[in-house]
Image (cartoon, rainbow, N blue to C red):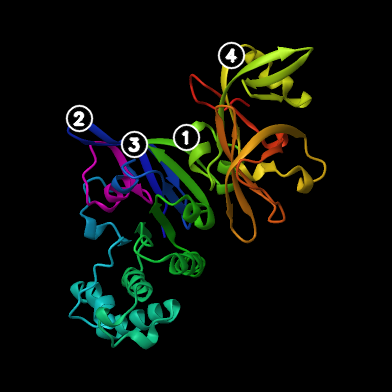
Amino acid sequence: MASVTFDHVYKRFGDVIAVNDLNIQIEDKEFLVLVGPSGCGKTTALRCLAGLEEISDGRILIGDQVVNDVAPKDRDIAMVFQSYALYPHMSVYDNMAFGLKLRKTPKTEIDNRVKKAADILGIGHLLDRKPRQLSGGQRQRVAVGRAIVREPKVFLFDEPLSNLDAKLRVETRANISKLHQQLQTTFIYVTHDQTEAMTMASRIAVINKGLLQQIDTPQTLYDRPDNLFVAGFIGSPAMNFFPAKMNKSDGKLFVDGGTLHIEIPDDRMTIFAPFEGKDVIFGIRPEDIHNPQFAPPGIDAQPVEAIVDVTELMGNEIFVYLKSGEHSFVARVDPRSRYHFDEKVQMVFNMDNMHIFDRETEKAIR
């Protein structure tokens, strides 16, 4: 088992900086997820760790060893790709055993490892089948099994669930989390899906345009995002943002966004007082906007007038898309709510969970 360190790592493709001064310390046995939009550099960072891309500057360490000049086959890592990359003419058993055969591993050892991995993944009954006889989820488990038999120090996953349907993604996601608990090995997982990141990771590294934006536990990223990008990327539906100005009136601070005029709670006034008269961005998550009839007791509830634009019934909740003057936002409300198109309604914002960002720097104000 091993820790992994990205020490001031850069990767350039000509004038394009795909990975920009990446510094991450991944602990032994940790499950770290690299998340961000397509093209942000997360897969490039993973490929640099695997040795499939040569870094431009900095160091990558696996354990205490600098692996900048170590060949991929000697880095003691195993990678699971988005495409299953199985050999179509080989059985499941032979696909899983192939890497071990290349390393001249004894046959009895190969047999033990393949059968053990197959049992862990629940594919022991599929060992004689060819890939074409398997479902997408089964093929993905074979690809994971091929990595497991290597018994590497570090597992790398590059968007392994992208080719699966929604139900299989949920099932396989749980299987990978369970696998991490069983193997007690370092997992590094790349995805653009923040739901995958939130449900699987012990820590998440959010990357945008090659730059690390924030790294922390899923709950901390959700509750205390460092900047506007992280706040908007983590959470589904995304956080609502309202351009506004911080104004003071009658000894009270207000977020003034034209049709949106919301009082700042008294216990936060000292934090935001230095920003009086400045342009800010007010943020609030859809789950913190309530139908007043079903609002949780004891919250600092500020009323907001709005007009219903669209409703989406999800069964256990309703997404309500609303307009207030020039502002559009979405609320995630109790399923007992009854809203209709173009209806004028009053919502309440839970100001206990609000966020304020400096409009110039886009950093969170705390």
Q: Residue tagged by mark 2? A: 15
| Nearer-N-terminus badge (4/1) | 1
Q: Which residues are magenta?
A: 45-66
Q: Position of residue 98 (x, y in %)?
A: 22, 75
Q: Residue at x 34, y 40 (%)?
A: 40
Residue mark closest to the camera, 1 vs 3? 1
Q: Quadrant of the C terminus?
A: top right
Q: Residue tagged by mark 4? A: 278
Q: Position of residue 156 (x, y in %)?
A: 35, 58
C-alpha separation, residue under disc 1 versus residue under disc 3: 13 Å
| Nearer-N-terminus badge (3/2) | 2
| Nearer-N-terminus badge (2/4) | 2
Q: Secondary structure at mark 4?
A: loop
Residue type (three-letter) at the residue carrying disc 3: Gly
Q: Secondary structure at mark 2?
A: loop
Residue at the limit of the structure toward the front, as seen here: 342
Residue 229 shows which numbered tag? 1
Q: Are marks 1 and 2 in contact (CB under 8 Å)?
A: no
Q: Residue tagged by mark 3? A: 210
Q: Position of residue 274 (x, y in %)?
A: 65, 13
Q: Residue at x 45, y 44 (%)?
A: 205
Give 150 or 287, whichever is nearer the viewer. 287
| Nearer-N-terminus badge (1/2) | 2
| Nearer-N-terminus badge (3/4) | 3
C-alpha separation, residue under disc 3 versus residue under disc 4: 30 Å
Residue 30 visible in the displayed image: no
| Nearer-N-terminus badge (1/3) | 3
Residue type (three-letter) at the residue carrying disc 1: Phe
